[in-house]
Image (cartoon, coloured by chain):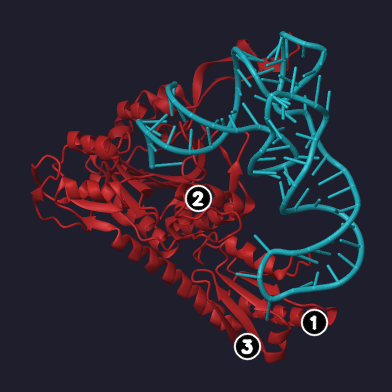
Chain colours: A red, B cyan
Amino acid sequence: MAKGLTSRATDYSQWYNELVIKADLAENSAVRGCMVIKPYGYSIWEKMQAALDAMFKRTGHSNAYFPLFIPKSFFTKEASHVEGFAKECAVVTHYRLKNDPNGKGIIVDETAKLEEELIVRPTSETIIWNTYKGWIQSYRDLPILVNQWANVVRWEMRTRLFLRTAEFLWQEGHTAHATAQEAIDETNTMLDVYAEFAENFMALPVIKGRKTENERFAGAVDTLCIEALMQDGKALQCGTSHFLGQNFAKAFDVKFTSKDGNLEHVWATSWGVSTRLVGALIMAHSDDNGLVLPPKLAPLQAVIVPIYKTDEEYKKVGDAARSVKSALEAKGISVKFDDRETHKPGWKFAEYELKGVPVRIAIGPNDVANGTVEIARRDTLEKKLYPAGQAAETVASLLDEIQQNLYDRALKFRQENTHQVDSYDEFRKIIDGKAGFVSAHWDGTAETEQKIKEETKATIRCIPFDGEATPGLCIYSGKPSKERVLFAKAY
RNA sequence: CGGGGUGUGGCGCAGUUGGUAGCGCGCUUGCUUUGGGAGCAAGAAGCCCCCAGUUCGAGUCUGGGCACCCCGACCA
C-alpha cells in the first residue's frame, strides 16, 4: 500500500480524497468549493479534451465561445430551467471597488450597482438561445452544431474534488435543428459519442439510458445519460445528452421559415461532460497503491528508471535507457527518462505507482550486462525481464493490453454488482449492503421513485436502452410495469 | 441549511493541574548510499485561526467571531 494512503476497504471516500491530493491532481483552494487543478490533473483533462474534441469535430461540430455572465432576466424565460438552477447561482451585483473610508481595506462601491444583475453561468442554454435568435431565419441556417469548452459555476452546498466543485470545467454542446427527428438523432449521436469515449478512452463500461422525469435536466423534454459503477458500488453519471424540444426556442422566440414557407420554432439539444470524468476515472480503476490510469489518457505512458552505483555504471545505464526511450518514442509512446539524482530508484517506483503511470521500465547494471530491461505494468504490478531490443514492441502491446484489462476488470466488476430483483425486500438487502446496480420493475410514477429514494437513498439512474422490455410488477407498489429500470445509490 | 469535528513550523500531529512550544515526515548542508519510498551528523523553519476578557502570566480558561473538514438535505 502506498505510504499513508487509506485503503479502499477502510474508507473509500477518504481513500479518494487522499488520492487526489497525494497523486498531485488537485487541491482545495482559498475559495470555498473551488479547486486548483494541478498540472498532472490538468494534463489528464487535456487528454480527455483532445479525444472528445476530435470526436465532436468528426461528428460535424465547431467550437465557439459565449459569455461567462448571463443577464438575470434571461433565466426567467424558461420556467422549469429557472426552477432547476435558481438555488445555486452566483450573482454579480456591482462592478467597482473602492477604498474603505474607515481605512479598513477595500469595499464594494455601492454607487456602482448594476442596472441588471448578472448571473455567472451555471449552464449556457439561455445566453446561447438568446444569441441563436439572431443567427436563425431560414431552414437554410440550420442545423447549428456548436460546442463550447468553458467553466461554469453552481453554488453547491457540499463539494468534493472533481466530483462536485462550485466551479467546474466542461464542454456544452448546443445544437439547433429544423425538425424534432433531427434533434432527437443528434441527442442519440452525442450520447453514443460519450459512451464510446468512456469505453474506449476511459476504459469505463457505461450504461446508456433515459432519465426519469424526476431526474431530467431542467428545461429538457428528454434526458439521456451514461451511467457507470464505481468500486464502492455507487453509480456516477458520466455524461448527459438532452433533447430540449422547442422549449428554449419558444422561450427566446427563435423561429425559422421552413421549406414550405411556414414559420416554426427551432428544435434543440444540449449535451455535456465535465471534469467530473477525472473523478470517475480515479474511482473506477485506482487501487490502494495509488492511481491506475488507462494508457490512452495517461499524461505519461511509460517511465524509465535508471539504477546505478558508480559514474561508469550510470554512463552505461544511461546510454541503454536513452536508446530504449527513442525506440518507444518512435512508436508514439510518451515516455520519460527519470535520471534525477535527487531521488532513489525505490522512491521513484513508489512515486510512479502513486501517479498511475501504466508502464515502468527499470534498467540497471545487470540489465546492461545481460541486454535486458525490467518492465512492470501498473494494473497488475507484474514485473518481467525482456530483451532490450524488444522493449518498444513489448511496451506498445502492453499498453494495449492494460487498456483492455482495465476495461475488462471494470466490466466484470459491474456485472458482478448488477442484480435483478423482484421484491422490495431483496432490493433493500442489496442497496443496504454492497449496493451496485439493481434492475427492478417500477410503476412509472414519480411518487414511487420518491418513496424509494427516501427509504433507501437509491434513485433510478436510468431506464436502460438495452434493458429487457418484459412487463412485470413494481417492487414497491405492486402495480404493473412495462420494463425494468436501473436503481443505484449515486454520487 | 441542520448535526458532528478540527484550526499549533511546508504537511501530519502531540502539548498534563495555566509558567512562554515539541515529535514524525519534508526542507538545507556534508559524508556514506542507490534492483521497492536509504543511514548518520549538523542546521533552518512558529502571529499556536482572529478579537475581546480573566490572570502576575493564556496554545491551554471564558465569551464572541471566522475558516475548513466530515455526515445529512440539494446537486453534474
Q: Mark 1 lies on which chain?
A: A
| Chain at tag 2 | A
Q: Depth-wise, is mark 3 or mark 2 nearer the camera?
A: 2
Under circle 2, the secondary element is helix
Which of pointers 1 and 3 lies earlier in the amino acid sequence? 1
Residue on which disc 3 sits = A389
- The residue identified by callout 2 is A16
Instruction: State whether residue A177 is above or below residue A327.
Output: above
Examine the rendered structure and indicate whether residue B16 appears above or below residue A176: above
Image point (57%, 41%), residue name: A35
Q: Name the residue under label 1.
A: A313
- Sequence order check: which comes first, mark 2 or mark 1? 2
Q: Please identify the quadrant where the C terminus of chain A is shown.
A: top left
Q: How far apart are marks 3 and 2 (CA)?
A: 39 Å
- Give the CA separation, mark 1 to mark 3: 20 Å
| Marks 3 and 2 belong to one chain | yes
Q: Which secondary structure lies at badge 3? A: helix
Residue A252 visible in image: no
Instruction: Give coordinates of residue A310: x percent, y percent.
Output: 83, 79
The x and y percentages for residue A383 are 56, 78
- The quarter of the displayed image where residue A242 is located: top left
Residue with the most extreme bottom position: A370
- Callout 1 amino acid: Glu
**Which residue lies at the image location 58% right of the left edge and 64% below the top edge?**
A353
Q: Nearer the viewer, residue A143 or A23?
A: A23
